[in-house]
Image: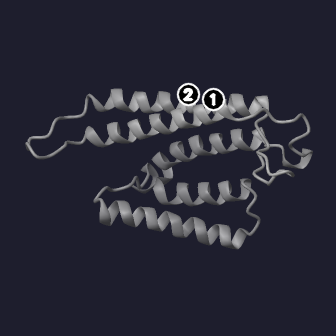
Amino acid sequence: MSHAPVPGGGSPGLRPQDRIANLVIAALVAAVAVAAMVAARDFPPTMLETDVGPARFPVVYALVLIALSVVLAVNTLRAPAAAPDAVPAGERPSYASVALGMAATAACLVAMAYVGYAIATVVYLFGLMTLMGRRKPQWNAVIAVGLTALVYAVFLYGLHVPLPVGSLFE
C-alpha cells in the first residue's frame, strides 16, 4: 500500500483486500504469541528467588505482540475505505513477492541445519534484499555479510549463545 500524500490532505484509506490482509496478519501474530506463551509454561523454573527465570521473557514479548496485534486490528477497522482507483496500477502489492519471501524464510531455517547460520543467513539476506527491490548487488552483499556478522557477534559474545554451524561442517 502506498503512503504517498493524497490530494486534499486526507488519508488514502484501505482497499478491502488490504483490510483483510491486515486483519489476517494481526490474527496470525497474536496466535503465534499465544503459542509462545503456552510453550513457555514448560520452561524449567529458576532456582533463585530473585531471578525471573527463562519463561518470563517469551511471555513479555508475547504480550507485547498481542498488544501490537490489537492496535493493528483496531487501526485497520477504523481506517476509511479506499476509493476504487486510490492505488495506481504500478503501486499494487506483489503477493507473489510476499509468498516468495515467506518461502525463502522457511528455506533459510531449514538450510541452517545443514550449512549453518552464517552461510544460510548471508544468502537469505542477499536474496531478500534483491526481492524487495534493492538493485545494488555489491551493497546487498556487503550489508548481508555485515548484518550476519553483527548478529553472530551479539549472540556469541554478548549473549553467549552459539548459533548453528551446520551438519556439513561438524
Residue 112 — which label?
none
Tag 1 residue: 23
- Note whether 45 is above or below 7 in the view shown: above
Relative image position of residue 96 (x, y in whole percent): 77, 39
- Note whether 31 is above or below 135 in the view shown: above
Q: Residue at x 19, y 43 (%)?
A: 52
SS class, disc 1 = helix
Q: Are marks 2 and 1 in contact (CB under 8 Å)?
A: yes
Q: Residue furthest front?
A: 8
**Label 2 Cα neighbours within 10 Å, binned few <14 / some 14-19 / many ≥20:** some
Q: Is residue 169 left or right of residue 71?
A: left
Q: Residue at x 91, y 39 (%)?
A: 85
Q: Residue 81 or 122: which is nearer the viewer?
A: 81
Relative image position of residue 111 (x, y in whole percent): 53, 47
Q: Residue 12 or 41: which is nearer the viewer?
A: 12
Residue 27 — which label?
2
Q: Amino acid at mark 2?
A: Ala
Which quarter of the image is occupied by the N terminus? top right
Tell me the distance, in whole angstroms, between the alpha carbons under discs 2 and 1: 6 Å
**Label 1 Cα neighbours within 10 Å, binned few <14 / some 14-19 / many ≥20:** many
Residue 11 figure quarter: top right
Relative image position of residue 35 (x, y in whole percent): 41, 28
SS class, disc 2 = helix
Q: Amino acid at mark 1?
A: Leu
Which quarter of the image is occupied by the C terminus? bottom left
Q: Residue at x 58, y 44 (%)?
A: 105
Relative image position of residue 68 (x, y in whole percent): 50, 39
Q: Residue 100 or 39: which is nearer the viewer?
A: 39
Q: Is residue 147 left or right of residue 93?
A: left
Colouring used for the render: one colour
